[in-house]
Image: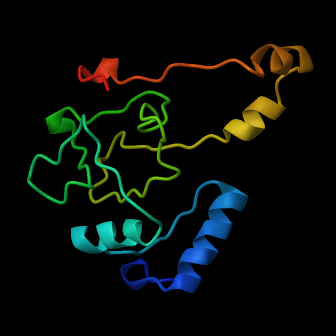
């Protein structure tokens, strides 16, 4: 999406972004250059922020922000959904890539609604009503 400055969103901007997220499930905003403080302020425009209990910001930045660096072990090289283990998981994440390596660094998204719809009817019937336990045991700090 272009034509919006994420460093100073209005209530109308937030409402429009919400609409787009509901429609497309992911939005991209090119050429945004937010400070860490502006990034956190953008998140607050959408509601209360959570603090990831397993990934503190190692450079003492805002507690609501996590900085992932491979040199700090910040690698998520598998399909995952971020921070699904709290009783009420976040409805969205805001990411900002600062430095993209020559190789790797890819982030991909998948539409789980569509994935479910594309399953065979017997598989959907099998899955409906099942529950799962989401925990953070793989990060050695279960919540």
Q: Quadrant of residue 64?
A: bottom left
Where does residue 71 sit, x and y in percent of width and height? 15, 37
Query: Which quarter of the rendered picture does the N terminus lie within?
Result: bottom right
Q: Nearer the viewer, residue 60 or 34?
A: 60
The correct choice, above or below, for 78 with respect to 104 in the image is above
Q: Residue 22's x, y, as percent?
A: 68, 59
Q: Is residue 3 visible?
A: no
Q: On the rendered structure, is 8 left or right of 130?
A: left
The residue lying furthest to the front in this view is 87
Residue 19 shows in the view: yes
Return the residue found at the far left. Answer: 59
Question: Could you say where residue 111 lies in the image, as x and y percent from the top left?
Answer: 67, 42
User: Looking at the image, which residue is at 75% across and 18% down?
Assistant: 127
Farthest residue, direction right: 121
At x 83%, y 30%, the residue is: 118
The quadrant in which the C terminus is found is top left
């Amino acid at each position: 999406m272009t034509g919006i400055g994420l460093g100073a969103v209005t209530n109308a901007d937030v409402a429009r972004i919400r609409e787009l997220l509901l429609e497309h499930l992911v939005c991209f905003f090119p050429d945004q250059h937010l400070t860490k403080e502006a990034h956190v302020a953008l998140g607050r425009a959408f509601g209360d922020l959570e603090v990831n209990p397993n990934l503190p910001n190692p450079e003492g930045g805002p507690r609501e922000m996590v900085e992932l660096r491979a040199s700090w072990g910040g690698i998520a090289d598998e399909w995952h959904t971020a921070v699904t283990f709290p009783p009420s998981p976040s409805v969205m994440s805001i990411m900002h890539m600062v430095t993209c390596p020559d190789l790797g660094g890819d982030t991909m998204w998948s539409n789980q609604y569509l994935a479910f719809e594309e399953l065979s009817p017997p598989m959907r019937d099998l899955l409906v009503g099942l529950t799962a336990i989401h925990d953070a045991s793989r990060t050695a700090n279960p919540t």
